[in-house]
Amino acid sequence: MRIASFFSLMLALVAFLPASSQADRIRDLVDIQGVRENSLIGYGLVVGLDGSGDQTMQTPFTTQTLTNMLSQLGITVPAGINMQLKNVAAVMVTAKLPAFGRAGQAIDVVVSSMGNAKSLRGGTLLMTPLKGVDNQVYALAQGNVLVGGAGAAAGGSSVQVNQLAGGRITNGAVIERELPSTFGASNLIMLQLKQDDFSMAQRVSDAINRSGLGGSATPVDSRTIQVITPRGNSSQVRFLADVQNLDVNIGVQDAKVIVNSRTGSVVMNREVTLQSCAIAQGNLSVTINQQNIVSQPNTPLAGGQTVVTPQTEISLQQGGGALQRVNASANLNNVVRALNSLGATPMELMSILQAMQSAGCLRAKLEII
């Protein structure tokens, strides 16, 4: 597969982008310090499975959990009883506690099997406390698990679509404890840029100061902007609502080429430029083929022995490695055409881009993720 197939969609999108710098709203560029989600986690049981639960001989914690739960309900399980549970599965439950979450508010939860259950389809999550990093219970989860996958097995054959060992419960947890909030207690608000950029921090600060909304913004570093606002929750809510809708001229961004080494994806922004260079690109293929040859006596009375002799064949092939010239270009379309003219696959392109950067003909920051 050539590079053109990877860049065809990118070229179509670039055609609709303006050549000059564009403006974005402040809400798309910054986050408000302290206004964030908090992770919750819990351990529970899913019951009502159609024989697809944990195998209790291999997951003894499922049986132990069920015994403890039954004892809390007033049911005593005699010692030494080996319960064969096919319809029960031990699961981990995760959720996000939103900023300013209030008691009684419902949130979504994700249920994931932690044993060897084959499927959670049709199961019901029993009441599960969800704890924060401080080991305090902030929400209670319970409800029917919705699994997006499907599967079937019969006669030793099976088919499966998507994941069956995990599911989701919409509004499956209710917040029981609120996080303390200091919002509105001070007249200082910190805005944090989503990407480090000194020039962007200065532009956001200038936009707020020119808006006439009554606040004063000062860039602290390449990511943080300190804003002096009126004191009080209502006043700060109105101020931030107006500030987040202000437009900021992004200007020229850093030239970047992002390479995903796992999938072979290559993405570059419009600031990438090329200098003139020459590239030799070729493939070296080595093939090793080993076969076992059996040698045995011609007659049974010859007194010989059957011998297995390995025979190995090694072949080496090298593809064309002609030296190709790449012209200098400051236009993204021309950059893509120049790279496509090399006839390299996306995996080969990663090595070419690294070599071009080392040679100084790729004017961009190369990031491999």
Image: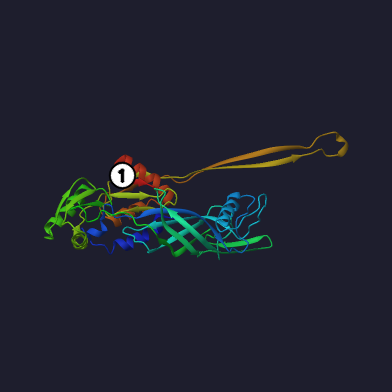
Describe the colour scheme in one phrase.
rainbow
**Residue at 29% across / 63% down in the picture?**
15
- Is 278 left, or right, of 79 in this rendering? left
- Is 178 left, or right, of 62 in this rendering? left
- Crowding at label 1, few (<14), some or many (≥20) Cα neighbours within 10 Å? some
Viewer can see residue 344: no
- Residue 62 position within the rendered picture, expressed as x and y whole percent measured from the top left: 58, 53
**Residue at 32% across / 55% down in the picture?**
36
Between residues 75 and 317, which one lies in front from this camera angle? 75
- Residue 183 position within the rendered picture, expressed as x and y whole percent measured from the top left: 24, 55
**Residue at 29% across / 41% down in the picture?**
360
- Residue 159 position within the rendered picture, expressed as x and y whole percent measured from the top left: 60, 62
Under tag 1, what secondary structure? strand
Between residues 290 and 213, which one lies in front from this camera angle? 213
**Residue at 20% across / 47% down in the picture?**
198
Tell how many labels. Answer: 1
Q: Residue furthest front?
A: 74
Q: Residue furthest top?
A: 303
- Is 96 left, or right, of 157 in this rendering? left
Between residues 111 and 246, which one lies in front from this camera angle? 111
- Residue 366 position within the rendered picture, expressed as x and y whole percent measured from the top left: 33, 46
Q: Report the quarter where the N terminus lies.
A: bottom left
Q: Residue furthest right?
A: 301
Viewer can see residue 159: yes
Amino acid at the residue labelled 1:
Cys
User: Mark 1 highlights which residue?
Assistant: 277
